[in-house]
Image (cartoon, grey):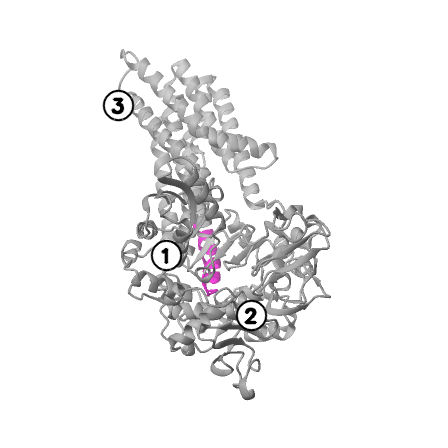
C-alpha cells in the first residue's frame, strides 16, 4: 500500500479554520480526512484494492508523486458495450480472419503508470496480441486473435481501474494546436542553429572580402527566411485575423517586431550596411516565441485531457411500436406524436405523455433536486427528467426536439469575452513603440542626413522592444499557475480566466452536486463493512443496475469494502420494482430479498427507528441504512475565506426550501443570499440584477446553464451527470472545495508576478531603446540582450509562482 502523505497546514484558509491535509493513497488528491480515512473517495479505495488483488502494485512505483484525478463514482457505473460489439464484428469480418485490429480512444491517462497499467490489463486477457498507446492523443491501437479476445471484456477491466474507452473519432484533434507548434519548434530550432552558424563568423571578425562571406550571408538570410515563414507565419496570421475582427491580439507586437527585423535585414544585406542585418535575431526570436506559446497551449490541453468527457446529453432515442419499432433515431429527428422509450438511467429529451401507469424519476437536471419523484401517468413528463426505475418507460412526444427546453439549455452562446485591460495595454504599447521609432528615425535623419543610419535607429527600436516578457515569461506564469492548481485537483480550461477572476465580486453556488455531493452519504458504513457474504451478494443484486441515488450510494460503499462482489454472476431472477416503495429479488433458494422504505414488506410491522432504507430477507430485518446530504469538505471554511476577502456568497438552488435553508444556515449565510426553488431563468435573472459582470457561478446541471451564460466566470465539479464542463472556465475533482481559495490566491500571486515582469520589461525597454536612439544598438548587442531579458523574466516567474508554500509541503 502506498505511503500516506501529510500535506501540512493549509495556509490559504482562515486562521481559525486551518486544518491538516492528507493525500489520497491512490490518486494523490489532497483532502481533509474524516477519522482515519486513507482515500478521498470510495472509487479510489475500490481501484486500490483491485490493483493490489491483481498484483498490479507497480503502478504506484511508476506513478510516483504524480497526482491523478480522483476515480469518483464512475468506476461503479455500468459500461456501454454495444458500440464495442459492433466495432469488434466489423474488425473481425474485414481483412485477415485470424487476427483483427482496431483504434480506440481512452480517457484518464495521466502518467507513465497509467500506460503500464493499461498494457498490463490488456495482456492479461486471452487472445491479446499487441497494444500501442499514444498518451498525448489518448489513443489505443489493438491487435488481437479473432474469436478469442473480447473488446467489451477489455473495456470492463479498464473500467474497474478507472479508465474509459471511447470511439477514436471522439478523441482525434484534441491536441492539434500544440502538435502543430511542436512541429514548428523543431523546424525553427534547426533553422536557428544554421542561422547562427553562418552569422557567427561575421561577429568573430570575418570580413566582407573573405571569399565565403557572400555565401554565408546568403545561407544566413535563407534560414532566417525559413524561420519567418514557418514560425513567424503563425504569429503574423493570427495577428491579421485578429485585426480583421477589430481586436488587438498579443501576437500583433510580435508580428511587427519580426517583420521590422526581417525588412531591415533585407535592406542591410542589399546595401551592405551590416548594422541593419538582424537575421539571427529573427531566427532566435521566432524560436523563443514558439516555445513560450507551446508552454501555454500544452498546459491547457493537459487540463482538458484530465476531464473525462461525460456527455450525458441525449443523442438518440429508440422508437416503440409501429413499423419502425426498435429503430434508433437521432434526438434531433424527434417530432410531436412519436412514441419512444427512455431506458433505465436515461434522459427524456422532450416534454412527453407517460404511457405507463407510473414511473420513478429524478428531476435533478431540471430543478437540481436529487430526491426521486413518483410520476403518475396523467402528468406531463418534462424534458430533462431521468428514468431511475429498473424498466424502460414508453412516452409520446408532445413537442419536437428543437422546441424542447432541454435543447435550449444545451445551446452554448459564443464566447465574446474581451480582455479590456489587455486591449488598453496593447494599444498604448504599440502606439508608443511606433511613435518612438518613427520620431527617433526622423530625428536622426534631420540631424545627420544619413538615411541608412536613421533607418537603423527606427528598425532597432522596433526590434529590441519586441515583447519577450509577454511571449516567454507570461506563458511560463500560466504553466506554473496551472501546475500549482493542479495539485489541488483544479484544472484551468481557458486562458482568459485570470482576467475574468479579477472581475469577480460575488461567488454563486448551486446546491445539489456543487455544495453537496451528487449522491447521499451513508452515515454509518459499519453495516456494509461487516455484512455477511450472503446478505452482501443479495444487496449487490438489488443495487447493481439501479440508478436511484440511494442505490448508487450503497453500491459505491458495498464495492469499496467488498470488490469481489463485482465478479458475482447474474441473478437467478430479475428484480421487481414497486414504484415509490423499493425493489425485490428472489435468490436461487427462493428467499425474497427487499430493499426499500422501512414499512414496506415488514413482517409483523417491525420498523427500525430513524432508518431511511432497510434490507430484509423474507420480511425479516437484516440491516438498516440512514443517509444524509453530504456537504463538501471545507465548505464552511471556504465561505469564511470568501467573506474575509470581500467576496459575497449566494446559493441559487432548485431544491426544496427546507433543504436549501439548512445548507445556508450551516454556511452562516444571510437569508436573502439563499434562494430555493429557482428555475434556470430565475438563476440567470438574479445574476443579471444582483451581480452583473462580476459573478463566479459554480454549478453542475442543465438548470445552471442559463446562469453560466450570464456569469463572468464559470466553474463546475466533475460529477457523473454534468453537462457544463465544456462551458466552464475551470473544473475540479474530489469532494473538497478547498481548491477555490487556492484559485483566488494563485490569481493574486500571478497578478503580482506579472506586474514584476512588466516592470522589469519596461526598465529593459527604457535602457535598450535609449541605446537605439543614441545610435549605439548593434545586431550582436540586440541578440545578447534579448535572451538575457527573457532569462531574467523567467526567473521572476519562477520566484513568484514556482516556489511551494507551506500548504504544499
Image depth: mark 1 or mark 2 in front: 2
Question: Does the residue at mark 1 contact the one at mark 3 (Cβ under 8 Å)?
Answer: no
SS type, badge 3: loop
Q: Name, please, the residue furthest toward the front.
A: 589
Instruction: Give the residue number, with chain letter if any, for mark 1.
Output: 67
Name which quarter of the figure residue 773 lies in. Answer: top left
The residue positioned 35% from the left and 39% from the top of the image is 98
- Which is nearer the eye, 534 or 761? 534
**Other residues around mark 1 within 10 Å, as few (<14) / some (14–19) / many (≥20):** many
Q: Is residue 337 visible?
A: yes
Q: Is residue 245 left or right of residue 450?
A: right
Q: Nearer the viewer, residue 418 or 336?
A: 336
Q: Could you tell me which quadrant the N terminus lies in?
A: bottom left
Residue at x 48% of width, y 64% of height: 737
Left or right, residue 75 beside residue 547: left
Q: Is residue 35 above or below residue 407?
A: below
Is residue 70 or residue 213 the one in the foreground? 70
Q: CA distance from mark 1 to mark 2?
A: 43 Å
Residue 126 covered by magenta stretch: no
Q: Along the horizontal axis of the image, is 545 left or right of 118? A: right
Q: Position of residue 283 (x, y in %)?
A: 38, 28
Q: Which mark is residue 204?
A: 3
Mark 2 burial class by Cα count in 10 Å: few <14, some 14-19, many 20+: some
- Sequence-first tag of 1 and 2: 1
How far across and down, in percent of the image, does residue 294 sit?
A: 41, 39
Q: Indicate which disc, 3 or 2, sits on the residue closer to the N terminus.
A: 3
- In space, the residues marked 1 and 3 are separated at their CA atoms by 50 Å
Residue 757 in sight from this viewpoint:
no
Q: Is residue 333 left or right of residue 546?
A: right
Q: What residue would you read off at disc 2?
A: 576
Amino acid at each position: 500500500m502506498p505511503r500516506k502523505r501529510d500535506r501540512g497546514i493549509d495556509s490559504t484558509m482562515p486562521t481559525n479554520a486551518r486544518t491538516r491535509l492528507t493525500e489520497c493513497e491512490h490518486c494523490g488528491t489532497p483532502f481533509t480526512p474524516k477519522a482515519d480515512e486513507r482515500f478521498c473517495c470510495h472509487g479510489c479505495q475500490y481501484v486500490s484494492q483491485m490493483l493490489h488483488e491483481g498484483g498490479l502494485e507497480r503502478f504506484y512505483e511508476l506513478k510516483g508523486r504524480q497526482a491523478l484525478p480522483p476515480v469518483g463514482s464512475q468506476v461503479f457505473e455500468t459500461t456501454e458495450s454495444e458500440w464495442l460489439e459492433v466495432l469488434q464484428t466489423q474488425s473481425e469480418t474485414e481483412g485477415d480472419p485470424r487476427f483483427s485490429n482496431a483504434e480506440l480512444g481512452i480517457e484518464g491517462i495521466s502518467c507513465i503508470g497509467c500506460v503500464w497499467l493499461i498494457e498490463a490489463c490488456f495482456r492479461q486477457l486471452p487472445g491479446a496480441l499487441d497494444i500501442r498507446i499514444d498518451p498525448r492523443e489518448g489513443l489505443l491501437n489493438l491487435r488481437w486473435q479473432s474469436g478469442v479476445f473480447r473488446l467489451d471484456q477489455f473495456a470492463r477491466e479498464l473500467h474497474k481501474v478507472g479508465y474509459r474507452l471511447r470511439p477514436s473519432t471522439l478523441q482525434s484533434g484534441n491536441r492539434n494546436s500544440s502538435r502543430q507548434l511542436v512541429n514548428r519548434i523543431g523546424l525553427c530550432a534547426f533553422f536557428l542553429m544554421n542561422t547562427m552558424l553562418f552569422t557567427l563568423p561575421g561577429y568573430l571578425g570575418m570580413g566582407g572580402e573573405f571569399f565565403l562571406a557572400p555565401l554565408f550571408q546568403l545561407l544566413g538570410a535563407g534560414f532566417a527566411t525559413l524561420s519567418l515563414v514557418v514560425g513567424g507565419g503563425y504569429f503574423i496570421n493570427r495577428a491579421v485575423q485578429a485585426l480583421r475582427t477589430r481586436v488587438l491580439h498579443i501576437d500583433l507586437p510580435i508580428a511587427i517586431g519580426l517583420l521590422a527585423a526581417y525588412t531591415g535585414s533585407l535592406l542591410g544585406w542589399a546595401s551592405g550596411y551590416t548594422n541593419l542585418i538582424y537575421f539571427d535575431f529573427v531566427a532566435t526570436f521566432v524560436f523563443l516565441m514558439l516555445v513560450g506559446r507551446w508552454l501555454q497551449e500544452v498546459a491547457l490541453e493537459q487540463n482538458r485531457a484530465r476531464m473525462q468527457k461525460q456527455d450525458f446529453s441525449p443523442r438518440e432515442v429508440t422508437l416503440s411500436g409501429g413499423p419502425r419499432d426498435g429503430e434508433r433515431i437521432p434526438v434531433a429527428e424527434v417530432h410531436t406524436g412519436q412514441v419512444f422509450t427512455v431506458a433505465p438511467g436515461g434522459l427524456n429529451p422532450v416534454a412527453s405523455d407517460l404511457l405507463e401507469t407510473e414511473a420513478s424519476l429524478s428531476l435533478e437536471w431540471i430543478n437540481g433536486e436529487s430526491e426521486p419523484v413518483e410520476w403518475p401517468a396523467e402528468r406531463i413528463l418534462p424534458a430533462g427528467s431521468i428514468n431511475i426505475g429498473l424498466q424502460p418507460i414508453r412516452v409520446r412526444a408532445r413537442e419536437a426536439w428543437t422546441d424542447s427546453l432541454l435543447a435550449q439549455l444545451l445551446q452554448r452562446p459564443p464566447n465574446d469575452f474581451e480582455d479590456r485591460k489587455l486591449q488598453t495595454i496593447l494599444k498604448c504599447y504599440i502606439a508608443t513603440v511606433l511613435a518612438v521609432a518613427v520620431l527617433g528615425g526622423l530625428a536622426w535623419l534631420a540631424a545627420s542626413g544619413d538615411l541608412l543610419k536613421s533607418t537603423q535607429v527606427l528598425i532597432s527600436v522596433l526590434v529590441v522592444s519586441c515583447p519577450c516578457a509577454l511571449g516567454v515569461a507570461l506563458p511560463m506564469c500560466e504553466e506554473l499557475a496551472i501546475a500549482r492548481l493542479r495539485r489541488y485537483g483544479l484544472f484551468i480550461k481557458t486562458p482568459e480566466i485570470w482576467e475574468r477572476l479579477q472581475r469577480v465580486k460575488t461567488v454563486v453556488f448551486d446546491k445539489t452536486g456543487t455544495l453537496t455531493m451528487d449522491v447521499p452519504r451513508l452515515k454509518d458504513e459499519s453495516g456494509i463493512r461487516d455484512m455477511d457474504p450472503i446478505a452482501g451478494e443479495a444487496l449487490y443484486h438489488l443495487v447493481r443496475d439501479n440508478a436511484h441515488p440511494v442505490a448508487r450510494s450503497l453500491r459505491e460503499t458495498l464495492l469499496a469494502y467488498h470488490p469481489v462482489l463485482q465478479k458475482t454472476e447474474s441473478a437467478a431472477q430479475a428484480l421487481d420494482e414497486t414504484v415509490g416503495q423499493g425493489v425485490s429479488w428472489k435468490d436461487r433458494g427462493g428467499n425474497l430479498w427487499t430493499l426499500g422504505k422501512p414499512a414496506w414488506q415488514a413482517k409483523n410491522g417491525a420498523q427500525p427507528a430513524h432508518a431511511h432504507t432497510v434490507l430484509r430477507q423474507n420480511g425479516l430485518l437484516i440491516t438498516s441504512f440512514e443517509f444524509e446530504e453530504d456537504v463538501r469538505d471545507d465548505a464552511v471554511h471556504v465561505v469564511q475565506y470568501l467573506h474575509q476577502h470581500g467576496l459575497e456568497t449566494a446559493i441559487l438552488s432548485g431544491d426544496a426550501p427546507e433543504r436549501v435553508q439548512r445548507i445556508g444556515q450551516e454556511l452562516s449565510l444571510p437569508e436573502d443570499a439563499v434562494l430555493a426553488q429557482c428555475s434556470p431563468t430565475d438563476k440567470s435573472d438574479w445574476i443579471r440584477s444582483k451581480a452583473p459582470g462580476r459573478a463566479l457561478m459554480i454549478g453542475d446541471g442543465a438548470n445552471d446553464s442559463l446562469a453560466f451564460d450570464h456569469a463572468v466566470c464559470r466553474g463546475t465539479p466533475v460529477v457523473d451527470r454534468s453537462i457544463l464542463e465544456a462551458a466552464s472556465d475551470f473544473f475540479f475533482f474530489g469532494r473538497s472545495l478547498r481548491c477555490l481559495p487556492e484559485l483566488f490566491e494563485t490569481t493574486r500571486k500571478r497578478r503580482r508576478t506579472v506586474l514584476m515582469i512588466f516592470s522589469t520589461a519596461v526598465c529593459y525597454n527604457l535602457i535598450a531603446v535609449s541605446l537605439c536612439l543614441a545610435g549605439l544598438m548593434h545586431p550582436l548587442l540586440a541578440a545578447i540582450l534579448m535572451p538575457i531579458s527573457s532569462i531574467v523574466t523567467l526567473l521572476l516567474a519562477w520566484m513568484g509562482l514556482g516556489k511551494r508554500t507551506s500548504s504544499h509541503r
